[in-house]
Amino acid sequence: MFVSKNSRFIGNPIRKLDLLAEKLSKEGKKVIKLNTGDPAKYFSPPKTLQEAYIKALEENKVFYSSSIGLRELREEVAKRYKNYYNLDVTEDKIIIGQGISELIYFLNASLIDKNDSAALFRPFYPPYLPNLLFFGGKLLLADYKEEDGWSIDIDALRKKIKNAKKKPKYLLIINPNNPTGGLLDRKQLEEVVEIAKDFDIFIVSDEIYDELVYEGKFTSICEVAKGIPYVIFNGASKSFVATGLRVGYAIFPEEDKKSTELYKKFIDFAALRLCGNTPAQYAVAEALKNDKEHKEFLKDFLKELKQRIELGAKLANETGYLTTQKPKAAFYIFPKVDFSNLKIKNDKELVEKLLVSKFVQVVDGSGFGTLKHIRIVTLADKETLQEAFERITQFFKEEKKA
Ligand code: PLP
């Protein structure tokens, strides 16, 4: 093979059927894409952000900026975590990435040697896995308990880690979670921190949906993990509706040996790719500065998102073949499929056939580590969601066993 052996792990299940969807669209089919969590397809970012982006271009701010990110932006990120979660961190401990996606790469490239492992809860956001496998890493899997509102099976995690020959390099928490829409409460987070402490494991906390919560209260890892090594990932993609600007950040609040080593390695990786998108960083800095406007913006945004996710969950449950837990956050539902009365046998076959025959694109659960679910993005407007579920219902009718 011309390409490297480990490149076989690279790919993104969320986008796997994109080319097929494009081909169908080109043929004139009205494809409904419910596969990517991209709010910018249906909503606009705050005005300040748009204006600041244009201004940055007009002022010719298109130069290579500092590798670790514009100081203005890092200062605003530090302020945000202080104001929201009472975290004391200076801007020099913050590194701007081209979305969290790039930071996931930095993470694994920095930490993983062949046969190292990382502990992930299943179902997980797909890109974490290929990044891990590419560097020769392995999964140490623990499960969320679906029947218990997608809470963490903490005893199973402890047992797994205890029995592992080699302790995982890091333990990932995605909270609120994609794809389940679950939210861990403070107690569960404290239990995770206890385990990390007991086994001396570094925590990675992906908090990209921290502001998109409909039920319960979000707790940041920094509120419960003081004094233990961890990094936070967050960014502008979701709550600032700025997916295409590619601005994410990593925060390293602690001074221990692990945090410091990893932080320094992130600086090296950041330097290797010169810098992030400069005008986008100016835009996000300005948007973060205008917290009052952001809060106002968020009120309407959340109201809409809540209506859409609730509608999606209701329509999914009404199909008779999908059952979904009530989502507490983000904009995904992750229903379980009842295959017992269906001709199709598994999630992968389901999503492919649904796209080809009904032109609705969703993602198979396999991409997230489970086999009996599909992920549906609920960002679309009411009419689009209704039409999508009419097609899905019709699809199940046609697939019903005789
Ligand atoms: N982390 C999670 C949990 C996500 O759901 C997503 C996008 O869907 C990302 C990270 C990617 O974020 P970014 O746009 O900052 O690369």
Image: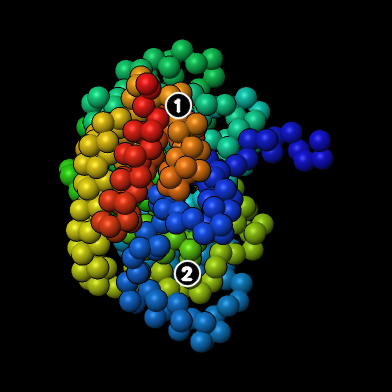
Identify the secondary structure beneath mark 2.
Answer: helix
Please give the residue where the numbered disc 2 appears in the rendered image.
Answer: 281
Name the quadrant containing residue 39: bottom left
Q: Is residue 324 left or right of residue 61?
A: left
Q: Distance between the residues labelled 2 and 1?
A: 46 Å
Measured from the top left, where is residue 312 in percent x and y? 26, 46
Nearer the observer, disc 2 or disc 1?
A: 1
**Residue shown at the point (35%, 63%) measured from the top left:** 42
Q: Is residue 15 left or right of residue 331?
A: right
Q: In which quarter of the image is the N terminus?
A: top right
What is the basis of the colouring in this image?
A: rainbow
**Residue shown at the point (60%, 33%) measured from the top left:** 133
Please give the residue where the numbered disc 1 appears in the rendered image.
Answer: 344
Amino acid on which the number 2 mark rests in the picture? Gln
Identify the secondary structure beneath mark 1.
Answer: loop
Nearest to the observer: residue 306 or residue 120: 306
Q: Quadrant of the C terminus?
A: top left
